[in-house]
Structure formats: C-alpha cells, structure tokens
Amino acid sequence: MNSSTIPLISRRDALIAGAAAAAVSSSAPAAPAPAPAVPSDATVPRMKLSLTVNGQAHALDLDTRTTLLDALREHLNLTGTKKGCDHGQCGACTVIVDGRRINACLTLAVMHEGAQVTTIEGLGTPQNMHPLQAAFVKHDGYQCGYCTPGQICSAVGVLDEIRRGVPSHVSADLAARPVLSAEELRERMSGNICRCGAYSNIVDAITEVAGSRS
Ligand code: FES
Ligand code: FES
C-alpha cells in the first residue's frame, strides 16, 4: 500500500479517541444482575427446639438452617467451641452429642431435638479442670489454643471409643481390644488439625490420661 494513502493520525489524536471510547463504554452501564431472592423473616422456616447443653436445658426457636455450631456460639453464647473451617475439615468445632464426638459445623441444630450436648465449657472450669484439660496444660498441648477445645472434646470421645473397644483404621485386629498406642491416638485424632503443630504434646497429654485411667 502506498504510504500516501494511509490516513495520518497523531499520537495525541489516538489518545483522545481512546479516552472517548472508554468514557462511552463506562457511561453505558450494564444491565443490573437480578438481585438474589432474600427470604423475608416471615418466610424463613423456623422450628422450636429443646437442647440440654452442659446439663442445662434450653428452649430455642431457630431458623432451620442454623448449624449446631452457630446455635451454640450465636444463640447460647458458648463461644468455647470454635469455628475453624465451617466445612468439616479441621475439627475445631468438635462437641459431644449423646456420648459421641461430632463436628458441630456439619449438622443442623434442629436434627438434635432433645439431645444432650457437652462442650468444652461443660468438661471443666479453670478451678476444676477435666483431667484432659489439666494434661494439655501440663504437656503444653497447645500454643494459640484455637484448636484446643475441639482437640479436648475429641480426646474425650477417643478415650471412650477405646474403652468401648471401637476399632480404628489402624487397628490390626478388628475383634481385639484396641491397643492404646501413639499410632492409634494419632489416627483417631487425625480429624483435629492444629496449625501450631502441637501434635506430639497432644499425644503425650492424652496418653497420660489414658494410662492413669487404665
Ligand atoms: S469448623 Fe467444623 S470442622 Fe472445621
Ligand atoms: S494450638 Fe494453635 S491451632 Fe492448635
């Protein structure tokens, strides 16, 4: 092509044209996305619920979507139970329901009508600690302490499972009484994550309590 036929455009003209195009496109707003339907209070499904938590009876009236973890923390002000992942992956929310340890973030409160719930607040007090709480202190089984309520509630469940002869994934003989080894404890506590890495001290604490009870 003959260069004489190419229209000449200065750099300044190009910048003005670009700015004008940007202004036109930004001044033409895209159609707003439809707002998600937010249920009004009148349409939120609610249910009355009775729970006994740490020996105290509670009558609750909850949005049926409330997890047990949120019921404990937000409605009963029992904030010892921690929310780590809210997805069943860290164990920080472990509590004991009708004698079994569960992740409170993975279950709806309304599924536990009439249940007996034990949280870290129900195990002991600073003046009268549960043996596992005392052992965690003695063995430095924590650093920041965020995972600790879940670790201790889980450990209570572990010792009860071993006492009842419940095998784990690493039990060599499913019919034999579980051996209280570090391997067993690590496997049974593997659902409780500690970002501070206090694992070996946690095993020491649980082992001491298990040994003193056997
Ligand atoms: S908060 Fe429930 S498992 Fe992490
Ligand atoms: S003590 Fe910090 S996460 Fe376990």
Image: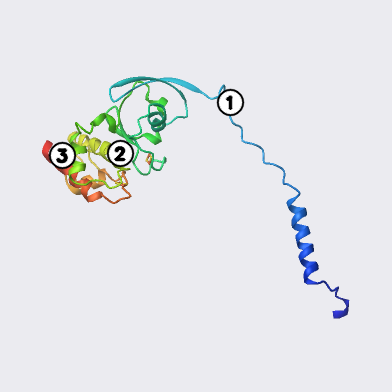
At label 2, the amino acid type is Gly
Name the N-terminal-most of marks 1 and 2: 1
SS for callout 1: loop
Vertical comparison of 147 with 54: above or below: below
Q: Position of residue 158 (x, y in %)?
A: 23, 38
Q: Quadrant of the N terminus?
A: bottom right
Q: Is residue 95 left or right of residue 1?
A: left
Residue 101 vs residue 80, the one in the foreground: 80
Q: Which mark is drawn over residue 150?
A: 2
Residue linked to disc 1:
40
Q: Residues within 10 Å of mark 1 (few under 14, many from 20)?
A: few
Q: Report the Cα–Cα distance between label 3 and label 2.
A: 17 Å
For residue 60, which quarter of the picture? top left
Residue linked to disc 3:
209
Look at the numbered disc 2 and say if its residue's Cβ is closer than 8 Å to ligand 1.
Answer: yes
Vertical comparison of 214 with 48: above or below: below
Q: Quadrant of the C terminus?
A: top left
Q: Residue furthest right?
A: 5
Please report the residue visible at 59 percent of the width from the left and 31 percent of the height from the top. Answer: 38
Q: Report the Cα–Cα distance between label 1 and label 3.
A: 51 Å
At label 1, the amino acid type is Ser
Q: Which mark is drawn over residue 148?
A: none
SS for callout 2: helix
SS for callout 3: helix
Name the N-terminal-most of marks 1 and 3: 1
Q: Report the Cα–Cα distance between label 1 and label 2.
A: 35 Å
Residue 173 in sight? no
Please report the residue visible at 57 percent of the width from the left and 23 percent of the height from the top. Answer: 43
